[in-house]
Amino acid sequence: MKKGILLVNLGTPDSPSVPDVRRYLDEFLMDGRVIDIKPIPRNLLVRGLIVPFRAPKSAKIYKEVWTEEGSPLLIYGLENKRLLQESLGDEYVVAFGMRYQNPSIQSALDELRAQKVKSIQVIPLFPQYASASTGSVHQKVMEIVSKWLVIPDISFISSFHNHPDMIQIFADNGRKHGIENYDHILFSFHGLPQRQLIKADDSKTHCLQDKSCCQTYNDKNHFCYSAQSYDTAKLIAENLGLTRDQYTISFQSRLGKEPWLVPSTSDIIHEKALEGKKRLLVFCPAFVADCLETLYEITVEYHEEFVAAGGEKVQLVESLNSDPRWIEVLKGFIVKQENNTLIPS
């Protein structure tokens, strides 16, 4: 019997049309782990306010990054699936799914089930753990598989934020741009509401209790998204030989008015421009594939904000995408799991 591998990323609309973007946003934002309030208020907020106003604007942005082959996130996901399958060989069946929209997790699991795999290893493609991303993937997989009469062995990866080979790829991608050619380095991670991090702290005594609680990764904040993000950035910075004053860690893509993780990338962009910085190099190590948040939010929106404030250039460092070394990282997860050794965490 073959072994199943399930790669999962966040999701993308089927097309940049307003109806398809609306469907995507509806499924995404109605997830109780993404907007974690009671169902009735969430329904009113998402379907009454956010989606009707956001869908047309988001559709225009998706058109800016869409290619002839489709969404970049989908293209890289399918390429990862193909390359990993080629590398692993016929003993494995590799499937790819999106948490929201298509190809769905349901369709990917159906593919593995049809092959009668004896095990399934679930690899959410998010380096840092968050309930709204990795946690949601795990929950969805368990909901689907719990209805099967025959349930194979199933294992999950929760995070890989400090995997040395991943750190090396990001650092090498940054070096291609010539670190010395930039006035400042920015590590921009996807943001989260502070409330979600506090809820995830079972001790209720550590998370966001002071300004430095996330800056040292330890047992107390082992599954903290912010702490893992800081650790990822520090490891890349160390690899590049950066001093602490040469880089800043920030969070992007804020939604709504409640407190999110700070500092925001937008605020740092303006701050550095006012300090007289002219050229910023931006890493986005929360994303294993370039997507709307990197190709448009960083490359277009933040670049324009920086120039308007007096800067000259915001340069995005490309993500892991379909780099052969990234495929080897994914393959390594599988080998280590089967050998019952620990995956870096």
Image: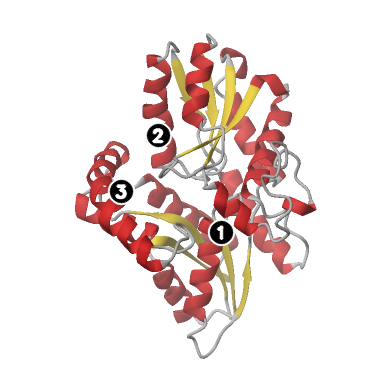
Quarter location, residue 223? bottom right
Is residue 305 or residue 15 the one in the foreground?
305
Q: CA distance from mark 1 to mark 3?
A: 28 Å
Q: Nearer the viewer, mark 1 or mark 3?
A: 1
Q: Secondary structure at mark 3?
A: loop
Residue pointed to by mark 3? 70
Asked whether disc 1 touches disc 3, contact meaning CB atoms under 8 Å apart, the reply is: no
Is 59 on the left or on the right of 78, as rendered? left
Quarter location, residue 200? bottom right
In this rendering, the answer to whether 204 lies above or below 108 is above
Q: Earlier in the sequence, mark 1 or mark 3?
A: 3
Residue 122: x percent and y percent? Answer: 57, 66
Q: Secondary structure at mark 1?
A: helix
Residue 309: x percent and y percent? Answer: 42, 14
Is residue 255 or residue 296 the one in the foreground?
255
Mark number, residue 131: 1
Residue 126: x percent and y percent? Answer: 56, 52
Residue at 53% in and 70% down: 139
What count of labels does the image hold?
Answer: 3
Q: CA distance from mark 2 to mark 1?
A: 23 Å
Residue at 72% in and 58% down: 343
Q: What's the residue type where badge 2 is placed? A: Glu
Color encoding of the figure: secondary structure
Is 75 on the left or on the right of 84, as rendered? left
Residue 6 seen: no
Q: CA distance from mark 2 to mark 3?
A: 18 Å
In this rendering, the answer to whether 213 lies above or below 43 is above
The image quadrant where one finds the N terminus is bottom right
